[in-house]
Image (spheres, rainbow, N blue to C red):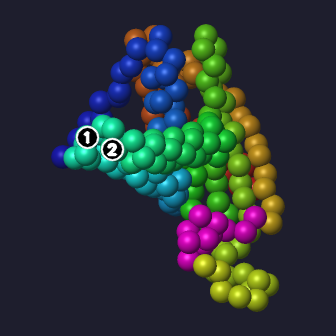
Amino acid sequence: MTKKRVPSKIDTGETLKVKQTLDEAAIKALKSMGFEEDHRWSNTKLVLMSISCVFALIAQFYPMPFPQNRLLLAICCAIYFTLSSILQVVISCVERDVIVASLPKDGRAVRIRSAFPRFQDKYTLKIEVFEGKRLSDVREFGFKVLPLVQTFFSFTIDKSVLKGKNFKVGNYFDLEGYFDGEGACIDFENAIRKALK
């Protein structure tokens, strides 16, 4: 017996919810093409946030009365501020509007950005395709690449292509707010395939 799929329903007046639903469909389309999601920057952000919280907890709960713990408080606050600043730079400059980045597959990696301005009916996907080689396969360095460097830069970029495609939101939501996820995934997958050509 097959299970009948119930379409998801959202309030189409909520711009952020509409964008989130379409972003999830774009991620699903990329994964259905055999690309795996790259979680390196997400993991980096989690580590930075965790270390920041540890220093905040030390500053708050270290068992030393106030006048004597001024140096400890200053150090913990400085480290917290520095790590929070680095985290903000990663969010603002590295990630920006990226919804998904893939690990390299067959010498290509894909990064997808999206935009859905308020009071508009156009959802934009910006698909970046990077072609290159795995850093572990590159022999021109003449020395072994450090594992930490390989963790964040595992792919040398020989060529990159950026293609943008607009989609009319009304094609995926009806008047009652039901979402055509399969139709969106098919259209997004076609856009990704065109960018990969």
> Which residue is tagged 2?
68
Seen in the picture, residue 63 relative to 146 is either above or below; the reply is above
Image coordinates of residue 34 in percent, x first then y, are: 52, 60
> Dot 2 lies on which element?
helix
> Which residue is tagged 1?
65
Image coordinates of residue 175 in percent, x first then y, are: 45, 10
Which segment is the magenta one?
Answer: 147-157
Residue 135 shows in the view: yes
Foreground of the two, 147 or 112:
147
Measuring 61% from the left and 71% from the top, which residue is drawn there? Answer: 149
Foreground of the two, 49 or 104:
49
Q: Check if residue 74 falls in the magenta segment.
A: no
Residue 27 shows in the view: no
Disc 2 crowd, CA 10 A, few/some/many (<14, 14-19, 20+):
few
Q: Give amino acid for label 2.
A: Gln
Determine whether label 2 and label 1 are within 8 Å by CB: yes
Measuring 40% from the left and 52% from the top, which residue is drawn there? Answer: 51
How far apart marks 2 and 1 lie (CA) works out to 6 Å
Image quadrant of residue 179?
top left
Image quadrant of residue 130?
bottom right
Image coordinates of residue 145 in percent, x first then y, are: 65, 80
Seen in the picture, residue 172 relative to 191 is either above or below; the reply is above
Disc 1 crowd, CA 10 A, few/some/many (<14, 14-19, 20+):
few
Image coordinates of residue 82 in percent, x first then y, are: 54, 45
Measuring 76% from the left and 43% from the top, which residue is drawn there? Answer: 163
> Dot 1 lies on which element?
loop
Q: Give amino acid for label 1.
A: Pro
Seen in the picture, residue 56 relative to 197 is either above or below; the reply is above
Seen in the picture, residue 75 relative to 92 is either above or below; the reply is below
